Amino acid sequence: MTSTSDTPRILVTGAGGFVGHHLVEYLKKQGAWVRGVDIKKPEYSQTSADEFLLLDLREKHNAETATAGVDRVFALAADMGGMGYISSHDAVILHDNTLINTHTLEAARKNGVQRYLFTSSACVYPEERQEITDLAPLKEEDAYPANPQDAYGWEKLLGEKFCQYYRQDHGLETRITRFHNIFGPQGTWDGGREKAPAALCRKIATAKLTGNHEIEIWGDGEQTRSFCYVDDAVKGLHLLMNSDYAEPLNIGQDRMVTINELADSIADIAGISIIKKHIPGPQGVRGRNSDNTRLKKVLQWEPEVSLETGLRQTYEWIESQVQKQLES
Ligand code: NAD
């Protein structure tokens, strides 16, 4: 079904989550009509979606309800979290995300959706390409021969293939991005699913507010990553959806830092000195960075917000959350 007016009708799945919530805000500012779908409402502020449906997309009939009457789908819903979660929930992640993606894509096809964007991940890249800290940035073609570290990455690869075959066999215009560590305010910052930037902001805010400046870091902290601010991520999604490019495309920053450097930057923003205590814990691959050659060529754009600017926004928001928690 197509919209009857010029206003695009857009579904964002996972709209109760971190990136989905920010994407809904962005699309509303662009003038779209937006339906958000998730199993939960956004935790930290009201959604700006025109309609928000609480639906479990592991169920086929819910996916059909979710995709009815929309022109475009941003498929963000997923069972996911930081390394602590991903490395210890392989079976449930594979099960849930396969059902979510299979049902949402098929329902979109049945309902005549015109464009469908799937959010894949840098976790698809093979483990053996990421065994050193100072590795070459990952190009899209590096994904094969495939050997992702966890079930989360295997499922994302399958989701990518689903999109490519639905485009080939059914003519559904699909778009695929591979996100590299998106961070920002209003993301999960405690409870076990939080990722490294949010976890470190929480630990450093707690250190500042309690006066105990020792913070725990999983491993030696020399593992490397690049981090992309959420405003850039949603802009990249919007540009990719509107582009003609149907192959997987990295969206991430290409500035690699160690986890120790990330912690030091956050401590600088907090205005405290910290004592790092290195403890055993899941670390994921040893190094990972985004090669943005194709991104720049295809979208004539790349992420613009510096790590320091993004971390400041994120830290200030998480410090206010920790403050509230300590007072309650
Ligand atoms: P998030 O966990 O904050 O959001 C995902 C949302 O999906 C959650 O709100 C969750 O409730 C919802 N969901 C889970 N199961 C569902 C179900 N059965 N039915 C309906 N909704 C369900 O994650 P995010 O950081 O916003 O990530 C968005 C997307 O981008 C995900 O697909 C994720 O795999 C992908 N991604 C994110 C990053 C990152 O750094 N944030 C990196 C790579 C890929």
Image: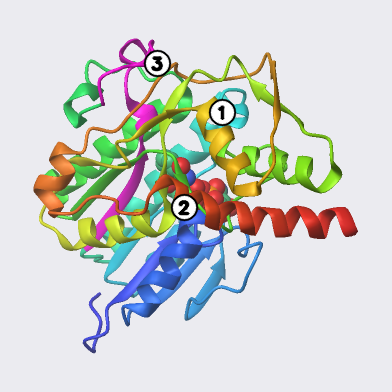
The amino acid type of the residue labelled 1 equals Met
Its colouring scheme is: rainbow
Q: Is 121 inside the magenta-drawn segment?
A: yes
The answer to which quarter of the image holds residue 217 is top right
Residue found at the very far bottom of the displayed protein: 5
Q: CA distance from mark 2 to mark 1?
A: 21 Å
Q: Position of residue 254 (x, y in %)?
A: 29, 36
Q: Which residue is mark 3?
A: 133
In which quadrant is the N terminus drawn?
Answer: bottom left
- 139, above or below 286, in the image: below
The amino acid type of the residue labelled 3 equals Thr
Report the mark closest to the observer, 1 or 3. Answer: 3
How dense is the environment of label 2, judged by Cα within 10 Å: few (below 14), some, or many (20 and up)?
A: some
Q: Earlier in the sequence, mark 2 or mark 1?
A: 1
Q: Which residue is mark 1?
A: 83
- 280, above or below 290, in the image: above
User: Which stretch did the figure color magenta?
Assistant: 115-137
Q: CA distance from mark 1 to mark 3?
A: 17 Å
The answer to which quarter of the image holds residue 69 is bottom left
Residue at position x 38%, y 11% in the image: 132
Q: Is 117 inside the magenta-drawn segment?
A: yes
Residue at position x 41%, y 64% in the image: 23
Residue 15, which numbered label? none
Q: Which residue is mark 2?
A: 310
